[in-house]
Image: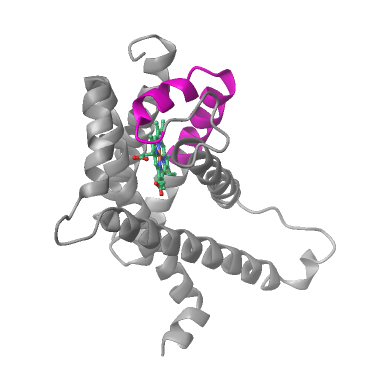
Amino acid sequence: MARTVWDSSVGKKTVMAVSGLVMLAYLVVHMLGNLKIFFGSDEFNGYAHWLRTLGEPFLHHEWALWIVRVVLVVAVVAHAVSAYQLSRRDIRARPSKYVHKRARASYATRTMRWGGIILGLFIVWHILDLTTGTVHADGFQAGHPYQNVVDTFSTWYGNVIYIVAMLALGLHVQHGFWSAAQTLGVGSRARDRALKTVANVLALVLTLGFVSVPVAVMTGVVS
Ligand code: HEM
């Protein structure tokens, strides 16, 4: 049964929609959490500490964080694998006249494909930068994310990488949210306008919220 669903295009699109919405929910919470940086280092670092003690004493230290990490890894992998397989299927299904002359994918398809690749690379960079500190600019300090974030946005490449990724994120969410709604059958002639507005607002709020952090560091509002 699960195999039949996964093998169908609708099944893969459903996996994309559901995993996309899981990541979107995480991103809204992550963006709101990041805004705590405007209340100073104690509040931001305290919040990061609280994330590690969440659910205690019922859960062991950091277990809630690890549960979120596992759910996100499953969502990212499911999203990427189904996107890859759907695009392969798309190429195979083309009529033979395209064999010699490659048909150009639509603007939306190309934006989603490249946006997805940029975001995948960004997530790897972001974890190496602010979670493990492997590629971090300046003496990474575990447990002091406020200083780490300020250090990241004190380099020109840190600002470029994050701002480019946030713009890609906005475009990806704008189109992705809309596609997910269509796949899950929420769309209808009456609702489509409202769904488009929700997609636009979500994309804009997420991008502006995330971008406000590097901008605040660059302008000295956060230092
Ligand atoms: C300006 C934008 C962003 C800033 C300042 C930022 C900041 C941070 C910080 C400080 C952490 C580490 C938190 C901690 O250790 O307690 C973190 C973790 C994380 N961020 Fe971001 N983030 C941004 C954008 C994003 C975006 C756009 C994504 C996804 C596309 C993302 C995904 C993640 C993930 C998955 C983790 C968890 C890594 C882990 O601990 O396992 N972040 N972020």
Q: Main secondary structure of the magenta part?
A: helix
Say which quarter of the image contains residue 85: bottom right
**Residue 68 location (% of width, % of height):** 32, 56
Number of marks drawn: 0
Q: In which quadrant is the N terminus drawn?
A: bottom left
Task: Pick out the residue farthest to the right.
Answer: 100
Task: Pick out the residue farthest to the bottom.
Answer: 1
**Residue 192 location (% of width, % of height):** 30, 52
The image shows residue 201, relative to residue 156, as above or below, that is below
Residue 181 falls left or right of residue 171: left
Q: In which quadrant is the C terminus drawn?
A: top left
The image shows residue 201, relative to residue 84, as above or below, that is above
Q: Quadrant of ligand 1?
A: top left
Q: Is residue 85 visible?
A: yes
Residue 87 falls left or right of residue 27: right
Say which quarter of the image contains residue 102: bottom right
Residue 75 falls left or right of residue 21: right
As for residue 192 lying within the magenta part, the answer is no
In this rendered view, identify the residue nearer to me: 172 or 139.
139
Q: Which residue is painted at 48% across and 62% down in the image?
A: 79
**Residue 218 location (% of width, % of height):** 44, 13
**Residue 153 location (% of width, % of height):** 47, 21
Residue 189 falls left or right of residue 90: left
In this rendered view, identify the residue nearer to me: 222 or 148.
148
Q: What range of the chain is rendered magenta?
A: 142-170
Q: Which residue is painted at 40% across and 69% down in the image?
A: 14
In this rendered view, identify the residue nearer to me: 99 or 127.
127
Q: Is residue 196 visible?
A: no
The image shows residue 67, relative to residue 157, as above or below, that is below
